[in-house]
DNA sequence: ACGTTGACGGATT
DNA sequence: TAATCCGCCAACG
């Protein structure tokens, strides 16, 4: 139901999620922060509802805890383990698999229409 | 237009 | 360690 992928906040969030490397994870808060909306972790959850082919399983709660319900939660864990993600009890071993901010930071526009220099 | 919801997070108790 | 509270803000009814 995400007709358009440009709801500003939405688009950025999804963009960041897509940047999480295989075998790594990021928290909702990390995503929101990297997308430019620090503190808007809940909106990340909303955005994921309309994922569509995004590596949604790589998004976990603070501390590496899986927040999805029973069924989906199990699926998420299995998918992550399938990528080589290691768990410590009920949570992802963040020490090892947490994505770095640099990796999440959105890349500059591929084909910027206008001035796309200013990178800093 | 308005109130409620939500795959949250962090601080407080 | 767990329960509760509050801030965040787009989507829904």
Image: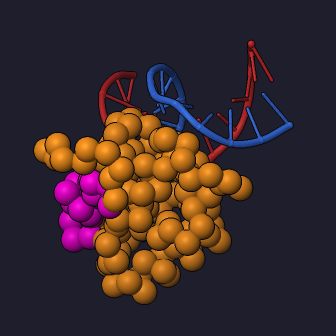
Chain colours: A orange, B red, C blue
Between residue A114 and residue A80, name the one nearer to us. A114
In which quadrant of the rendered view does residue A86 lie? bottom left
Looking at the image, which residue is at 17% across and 43% down? A118
Looking at the image, which residue is at 24% across and 62% down? A103
Q: Where in the figure is residue C10, as x and y percent of width and height?
A: 59, 37
Task: Answer left or right for A71 relative to B4.
Answer: left
Task: Answer left or right for A2 relative to A53.
Answer: right
Q: Where in the figure is residue A87, as x and y percent of width and height?
A: 35, 74
Q: Magenta stretch: residue A104 in it?
A: yes
Rendered position, A93 above or below A100 = below
Does the rendering let one see residue A91?
no
Q: How many marks?
A: 0
Q: Magenta stretch: residue A25 in it?
A: no
Between residue A112 and residue A95, name the one nearer to us. A112
Between residue A8 and residue A57, name the one nearer to us. A8
Rendered position, A1 above or below A18 = above
Rendered position, B6 above or below C7 = below
Does the rendering let one see residue A18?
yes
Q: Where in the figure is residue A101, as x and y percent of width and height?
A: 22, 54
Task: Answer left or right for A100 relative to A19.
Answer: left
Q: Which residues are magenta?
A: A95-110
Q: Where in the figure is residue B3, as x and y percent of width and height?
A: 74, 19
Which quadrant is the N terminus of chain A positioned in? Answer: bottom right
Q: Residue furthest left?
A: A120
Looking at the image, which residue is at 43% across and 78% down? A80
Which quadrant is the C terminus of chain A positioned in? Answer: top left
Looking at the image, which residue is at 38% across and 57% down? A16
């Amino acid at each position: 139901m995400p007709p358009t992928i440009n709801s500003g906040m939405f688009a950025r969030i999804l963009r960041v999620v897509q940047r999480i490397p295989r075998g790594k994870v990021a928290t909702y808060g990390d995503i929101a922060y990297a997308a430019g909306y620090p503190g808007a972790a809940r909106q990340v959850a909303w955005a994921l509802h309309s994922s569509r082919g995004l590596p949604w399983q790589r998004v976990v709660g603070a501390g590496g805890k899986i927040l999805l319900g029973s069924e989906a939660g199990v699926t998420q864990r299995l998918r992550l383990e399938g990528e080589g993600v290691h768990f410590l009890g009920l949570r992802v071993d963040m020490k090892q698999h947490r994505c770095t901010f640099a990796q999440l930071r959105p890349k500059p526009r591929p084909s910027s229409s206008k001035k796309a220099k200013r990178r800093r």
